[in-house]
Image: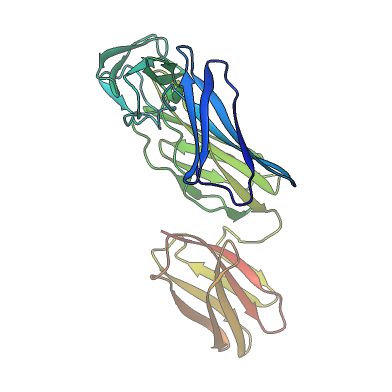
Amino acid sequence: MDLVINATSYVWSISSGSMSVISQTVNSNGTFCTVDFGNNFTTGVLTITTYNSCGSFSRNYVIQSVPLQPGGISGPGANLCLVSGAIYSISPVVGATGYTWSVPTGATIIQNTGTSITVNFGPGFTNTGNICVTANNACGSSVSRCYSVTARPAVPDAINGLASVCKSNSNVSYSINPVPGATSYSWSITGNAVLTPAGVNSTVNYNSANNSNATLKVSATNSCGTSQPSSKTIAINLSCRTADSQEETEGNESIRVYPNPSHGKANLSIEFEKDQDYIITVSDVTGKIIMTNLIHGKSGLHISELDLTGISKGVYVLSVQCENKSPQSFRLLIE
């Protein structure tokens, strides 16, 4: 080490009985220490302490003879039910002269090149386990690096679909991406909503929901078992009104929305007793306004075309507010 300004003396010490300081030198070019490492040395701490009339200061240096812990293990981690020829590998570890691998019960190493292994997973491997590796040299073995593997499918990706709905929504679609190796899927929902599963898709009817929140879950299954679930929290507005019927009447106005569901274009018909203005607002179920229009209505039957062909498929809320009346809301499904 370099000389320390204002230091008047240096003392080296060690924490391991299998290494010892056999000489130390201080000269104009720096401070040096010679260490003898015994046959049983694996790891220790070398400490240098500097002194002057005001006190002392120490710095530690960790020394080890066994290799460092291997880096991350690469290879498949899920859907290993009866899989043959799965390859796992690590990067070479500095100072290592060999490697020791272990695999879970029911799995067999069929090839070992040192930094990689090839594994067959037999009928005895149906759950989860660890693939582990240590780096070795003449002084011993490193800390193990382990990688969790499972015979079951991976956890499904995030569930696609609305995260905020009205209780009156009766046909809300949800889906996931297919999970590699899965042969079936299990869906569930809380809050008394009614779920209709169909593989990677499901439909939920919220009419019977009795809680402002519901948890939707889906798991993937293969012949070895079922994965951990992917879940989605759904906020349910128990009081909002998005009528599944296509017609409502308030006062003297009869309002119809058709066709519903539609492919983007729908008609709004209102029958007035007198000329009046009304406002149409279309929003998604989170409350974000998609479109708003002020329309001058004439007495009698008035029909307006709604062109929503540029928006995404899903459930929307159509609100109609006539003069001096509270707004009426309708559920509008775009397919």
Q: Is residue 334 left or right of residue 293?
A: left
Furthest-front residue in view? 28
Quarter of the image where one finds residue 193: top right
Q: Is residue 41 left or right of residue 9?
A: left
Residue 266 rendering spot, x and y as whole percentages: 44, 70
Q: Is residue 275 visible?
A: yes
Residue 249 rendering spot, x and y as whole percentages: 65, 70
Quarter of the image where one finds residue 250: bottom right
Depth check, front residue: 230 or 197 = 230
Q: Residue at x 47, y 36 (%)?
A: 197
All told, the count of numbered labels is 0
Residue 173 rendering spot, x and y as whole percentages: 48, 48
Q: Residue at x 45, y 24 (%)?
A: 146
Q: Is residue 77 above or below residue 120?
A: below
Quarter of the image where one finds residue 190: top right
Furthest-right residue in view? 54
Q: Is residue 240 above or below residue 228?
A: below
Depth check, front residue: 307 or 67 = 67
Q: Is residue 228 visible?
A: no
Depth check, front residue: 30 or 143 = 30
Q: Residue at x 57, y 61 (%)?
A: 285
Q: Is residue 159 above or below residue 81?
A: below
Q: Quadrant of the C terminus?
A: bottom left
Q: Is residue 263 above or below residue 326?
A: above
Depth check, front residue: 105 or 285 = 105
Q: Is residue 170 left or right of residue 155?
A: right
Q: How is the image coloured?
A: rainbow
